[in-house]
Structure formats: C-alpha cells, structure tokens
Image (cartoon, rainbow, N blue to C red):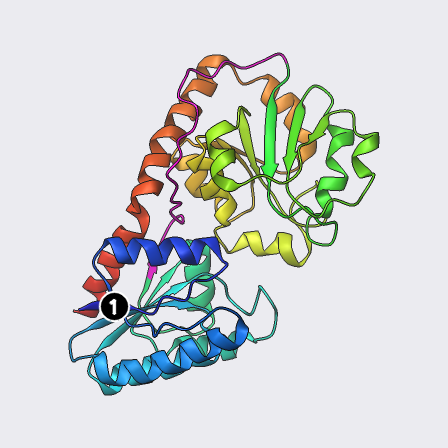
C-alpha cells in the first residue's frame, strides 16, 4: 500500500502533491479534524497514532517535508512497522527559515529511506553535507489546474511583455521596486498583494493589476513571458530569498509554464539548466538585459519557446514529474 497523511496545507505545491497521490490511489491515513493551528496540531498527532494501527510491513509512506515536529516520528513508526518512507522536499530549513544547520537538517533527513529533491544542485548540496540516503531529482514541480490558457497563436507586439504574479512586498521582492526604470522598450504586467501604496504612480513601463486568482491568471494572461525572479535586486538574485534560487525549484516557474508562458529565469538559478534544455524559456544575469534581449527574439524563435511551454503545461497538469520521481524512488527501495 502506498500512503500519505494529507494536511490541507496553504502551500499550493503541497496541496497539488496531495491531489496527485489521491489520483494515484494512495491511501490517506490522516485523521480528520477542524481548521486552524490547534486543529492542525491534533490532526498530525492523531494521525501518528493512526500510523501505528494502519501501517503494514511492505507499505510505502510518502512524507512531504518539512512536516515539523512529527517528521522523525513518522519515519520511526514506519521502520518499526516494516514499512518504507519516501520524503519529498519542498523546503530546506537551512535555507528557507535558517533555523537549522546543514548538519542538523541532514541528520533529520537520514531517518527516511529515499528522498526526492528539487534538482541536481540540491542533490549535490545534500551529498556534500553527508547525506547517505538515495536521492532522486524531481526536475520541476507539477502544477494542477482545471483552466487552460488561451490557445490562439501568440503574436509578439511592438513592446515585448512579461509578467510576474505573487507576493510583491518590498521585504521579499525588493527587485520589483527597481525594475521599471530599466524596462524602456518593454512592458511589465504585475499582479499580487503587498505593494507599497503609491509606488506605481511613478512607473512608466509597468502596469499594476492588483491581486488575481491563479486559475484566472492561467485562463486570461496575454503576456509573452513569465518572470521567475526573487530577492533584493534586478542585478542577479540576492538576499535570503534570492540566493535560495541557487538550490530550489520555485513553484512560480511551474505556475507560469502551466499558464503556457515561456519563462525568464536567473542564469545562476538551479532551474536554469532545466529551462534551457527543454527550450521553455531564457536565462539572464540581470533584468537590465531584458529590453535588448527580448527585442532580438524573432517571432519564429518565440513560437518555438511557446510551443515547448504549451507542451510542458500538459505534463505539469498530469503530474508527470512527480509520478516519474516517485517511481524512481520506489526502485531505490527494492
């Protein structure tokens, strides 16, 4: 039996993996409780008790990491019951919240039997810090939606247009407050919440559209490109959030591709090799490069990027990458 504990997480990536496991016939061993932090705590606690009774020898339990206090407990219960665990990493505490040292994180992850990591960069980092558990690369997170992007041929306009949708607070995405001044010849469509009031009044190349539902974005966006960037500056991705792109797969890349948009990513990001090898976008060192870079992409070249992104969106919606990684992890357990 393949099984999991659903958590109804606010994290979109985790919810999508829960849904994929449900579609794949996994058994949900979570105990239902109400909503809220207290209810979530008891849901996890009662689900640990449920594992003791429901988990059998030969079963495989997939754990979405981090699972906070109950991660090691799940691994230990599975081991005692003769079951195996596969851990899918969403975030590493060493980088995301910086509450764990690399040594502590690797020690915690050593309790599982196989780990699905984001990419080869994360694979290398864990190996270099002493991880002995078999590692499988996910390559990119899948993205589920019932909506479909506009399917008519996409003709480039006089001004190349790219878009960003997500959290846009100055604390996390300071680069957004610098980008307008270097975009002459391009247009930038910005969606999200957290914009510093009045900021957009001085913008010449940027249109702020407010917050938008993810499915509505997928259905309605008319931009040429999706921007996957983070951090403090337009000159490379820096700071706590930006530097994390050197090792993780941002779900925003999956979101943009699910909307059928070729993506623009930082050349030094961990996602860059995947994006270029699959022909679904371009890489740049700085956003200052965009006006000249985008103006020199012909309609024929763009059509190639667009077709590749539209093909990729179907794979993401089918859970292709999670299914492939999970099958590879199962092989490691034999």
Left or right of 151 on screen, residue 271: right
Q: Residues within 10 Å of mark 1 (few under 14, many from 20)?
A: many
Compared to 106, does 263 lie above or below? above
Name the residue furthest front.
Answer: 34
Compared to 223, does 268 lie above or below? below
Compared to 66, does 140 lie above or below? above
Q: Say if the magenta span includes residue 197.
A: no
Residue found at x 50% / y 28%:
220
Q: Nearer the viewer, residue 326 or 56?
A: 56
Dividing the picture into quadrants, the one containing residue 290 is: top right
Left or right of 12 on screen, residue 58: left
Left or right of 233 on screen, residue 142: left
Q: Quadrant of the C terminus?
A: bottom left
Magenta span: chief secondary structure: loop
Q: Dot 1 corresponds to which residue?
A: 3
Q: Say if the magenta span includes residue 140.
A: yes
Name the residue furthest bottom.
Answer: 80
Q: Residue 7, image x and y in percent?
A: 41, 66
Q: Quadrant of the N terminus?
A: bottom left
Residue found at x 51% / y 41%:
214
Q: Nearer the viewer, residue 128 or 303?
A: 303
Residue 137 in sight in this render = no
Compared to 193, does 7 lie above or below? below
Residue 180 in sight in this render = yes
Q: Nearer the viewer, residue 77 or 115?
A: 77
Q: Residue 250, image x and y in percent?
A: 51, 49
Left or right of 6 on screen, residue 155: right
Range shown magenta: 136-158
Residue found at x 28% / y 80%:
51
Dividing the picture into quadrants, the one containing residue 286 is: top right
């Amino acid at each position: 039996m393949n099984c999991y504990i659903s958590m109804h997480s606010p994290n979109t990536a985790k919810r999508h993996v829960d849904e994929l496991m449900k579609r794949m016939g996994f058994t949900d061993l979570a105990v239902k409780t109400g909503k809220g932090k207290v209810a979530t705590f008891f849901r996890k606690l009662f689900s640990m008790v449920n594992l003791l009774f429901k988990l059998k020898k030969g079963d495989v339990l997939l754990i979405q990491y981090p699972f906070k206090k109950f991660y090691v407990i799940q691994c230990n219960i599975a081991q005692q019951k003769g079951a195996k665990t596969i851990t899918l990493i969403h975030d590493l505490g060493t980088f995301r919240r910086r509450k764990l040292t690399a040594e502590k994180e690797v020690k915690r992850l050593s309790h599982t039997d196989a780990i699905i990591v984001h990419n080869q960069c994360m694979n290398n980092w864990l190996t270099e810090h002493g991880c002995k558990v078999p590692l499988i690369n996910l390559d990119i997170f899948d993205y589920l939606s019932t909506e479909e992007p506009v399917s008519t041929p996409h003709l480039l306009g006089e001004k190349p247009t790219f878009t960003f949708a997500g959290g846009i607070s100055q604390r996390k995405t300071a680069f957004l407050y610098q980008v307008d001044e270097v975009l002459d010849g391009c247009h930038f469509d910005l969606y999200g919440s957290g914009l510093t009031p009045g900021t957009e009044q001085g913008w010449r190349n940027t249109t702020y559209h407010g917050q938008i539902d993810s499915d509505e974005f997928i259905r309605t966006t008319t931009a040429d490109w999706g921007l996957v960037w983070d951090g403090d500056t337009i000159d490379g991705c820096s700071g706590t959030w930006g530097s994390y792109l050197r090792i993780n797969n941002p779900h925003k890349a999956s979101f943009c591709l699910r909307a059928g948009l070729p993506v623009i990513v930082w050349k030094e990001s961990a996602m860059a090799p995947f994006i270029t090898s699959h022909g679904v976008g371009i890489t740049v060192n700085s956003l200052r490069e965009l006006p000249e870079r985008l103006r020199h992409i012909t309609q024929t070249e763009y059509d190639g990027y667009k077709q590749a992104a539209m093909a990729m969106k179907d794979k993401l919606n089918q859970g292709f990458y999670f299914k492939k990684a999970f099958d590879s992890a199962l092989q490691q357990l034999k």
